[in-house]
Amino acid sequence: MDNNTLFQKFVTFTTAVHQITSEISKDVKSEALTPLQYKILEYIAVSQPVTLSEISDCMHMSMPNTSRELKKLTEKQLCERVTDPGDRRKQGITLSAAGEHMMNEAFRHIGIRFAERTGHLSEAERQEIIRALDLLQEKVFY
Amino acid sequence: MDNNTLFQKFVTFTTAVHQITSEISKDVKSEALTPLQYKILEYIAVSQPVTLSEISDCMHMSMPNTSRELKKLTEKQLCERVTDPGDRRKQGITLSAAGEHMMNEAFRHIGIRFAERTGHLSEAERQEIIRALDLLQEKVFY
DNA sequence: CCCTTTACTTATCATTTGATAACCAAAGGG
DNA sequence: CCCTTTGGTTATCAAATGATAAGTAAAGGG
């Protein structure tokens, strides 16, 4: 097939993914967080421990702005910083107990909505879906 | 398998999709647009003609803010409004020629990056990928 | 021991985005 | 023909985000 069919499918697919994830994770974040702060916590949650530079790189934000947001999150007691003993310029950033708890709650809500969406699927379908996810992740979204 | 494995996969997968799409569509938007304005144009491009209310709903923004952004886009000559003759309160919004051109350029850039990412795949792999995309779109991201 | 680079911070400013109130005009039902 | 609802506008304000300049302190190479 022409290269273009695949691209078309890719576009509609990613659009749908964005749509559904935004729907499914609507209102899961605490009122006390800005959208950006929530995204940062999400990133820390899955990649901890991380450094400021890593957050800055992966989230495409400048170091000054990253530093500012992280300061706020630290003040809110949602994450902790440990200076790397090997290189005292670096900081290892992790979620605090409160931060873990907040993110667990958020993920739990998302999980519930996800379950509503996929609860009716048969075991065979689930297996198929898992294979599809693995395939795409390996060949397209790597 | 337990319901949870699927959810875990779903989370890492959607994270990857967000990551890759953001990477692939980085810097494709004209400097003259804010991120929001670009998103709105993207939405109009795939759904035209749309009404203000539809944009407001789908993009989760208030009518006043939608109206403001649309006014700016109209002033920039990127989209056009036609009052619905059947119901003169409504407006059908479409891209202008300039708007179409701008979005085509953007999609072309994205297409190039996509091709770089998938160029090495065999025909059989492409077919597999298309099947996977269809499956997921039908069963999960509907 | 200097000098440069890396990792991060502080301060400041402009711009973008979100939220709210108050409004107008067309549609449509009783 | 009134009254309510729907679709949209304008104005205004606060908050969030982005960008830039200028700084500190540790690391590491020569």
Image (cartoon, coloured by chain):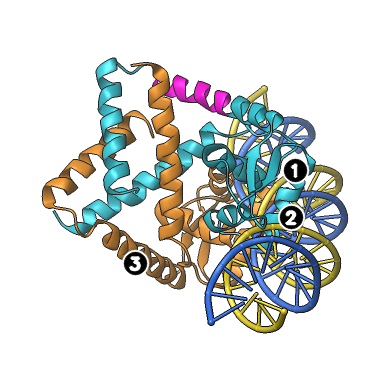
Chain colours: A cyan, B orange, C yellow, D blue
Residue A125 placement (x, y as % from top left) = 27, 22
- Marks 2 and 3 sit apart, C-alpha to C-alpha, by 36 Å
- Marks 2 and 1 sit apart, C-alpha to C-alpha, by 10 Å
Please tell me whether mark 2 sits on a helix, a strand or a loop: helix
Q: Which residue is mark 2?
A: A68
Who's the residue at 46% across and 25% down the image?
Answer: A114
- Marks 3 and 1 sit apart, C-alpha to C-alpha, by 42 Å
The subunit letter for the residue under badge 1 reads: A
Question: Is residue A52 one of those drawn in magenta?
Answer: no
The subunit letter for the residue under badge 3 reads: B
Under mark 3, the amino acid is Arg
Within 10 Å of disc 1 (Cα), the crowding (few <14, some 14-19, many 20+) is some
Q: Main secondary structure of the magenta part?
A: helix
Q: Do circles 2 and 1 both sit on a common chain? A: yes
| Dot 2 or dot 1, earlier in sequence | 2
Residue B108: give its label: 3
* Foreground residue among B128 and B57: B128
Question: Is residue A116 one of those drawn in magenta?
Answer: yes
Residue A91 seen in this snapshot: yes
Residue B62 seen in this snapshot: no
* Foreground residue among A47 and B113: A47
Q: Where's the C terminus of chain B, which quadrant? A: top left
Residue B119 placement (x, y as % from top left) = 22, 60
Residue A74: give its label: 1
Q: Do circles 3 and 1 both sit on a common chain? A: no
**For discs 3 and 1, the disc positioned in front in the rendered view:** 1
Within 10 Å of disc 2 (Cα), the crowding (few <14, some 14-19, many 20+) is few
The subunit letter for the residue under badge 2 reads: A
B116, above or below B31, in the image:
above
Under mark 2, the amino acid is Arg
